[in-house]
Amino acid sequence: QELVATHGGGSPQAQKMAIYAQSQLKNKAAVAKRLAGIE
């Protein structure tokens, strides 16, 4: 998946929200916890 940003395409905060919505953050957090031995 590729992310392309263009000038004038909305606020930086809106772009961050879109990235977080698509990033499967819960899965990445679970992997990070497992790798760190926190779980």
Image (cartoon, helix red, strand yellow):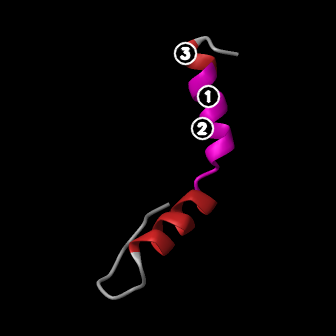
Q: Position of residue 5 (x, y in %)?
A: 36, 75
Task: Identify residue type, mark 3.
Answer: Ala
- N-terminal label among 1 and 3: 1
In the image: residue 29, left or right of residue 7: right
- The C terminus, quarter of image: top right
Q: Which of the 4 quarters of the picture holds residue 9?
A: bottom left
Q: Secondary structure at mark 1?
A: helix
Task: Check if mark 2's residue and mark 1's residue have beta carbons within 8 Å.
Answer: yes
Which amino acid, by three-letter code, is at mark 2?
Answer: Lys
- Give the residue at x 62% y 46%: 25
Q: Nearer the viewer, mark 1 or mark 3?
A: 3
Vertical comparison of 17 with 10: above or below: above
Question: Which residue lies under the disc numbered 1?
Answer: 31
- Residue 2 in the image: state x and y as whole percent: 44, 64
- How many neighbours does mark 2 have within 10 angstroms: few (below 14), some (14-19), or many (20 or more)? few
Indicate which disc residue 28 carries.
2
Residue assigned mark 3 = 36
Magenta range: 23-33
Who's the residue at 58% across and 53% down the image?
23
**Cα distance in 3D space between marks 3 and 2:** 12 Å
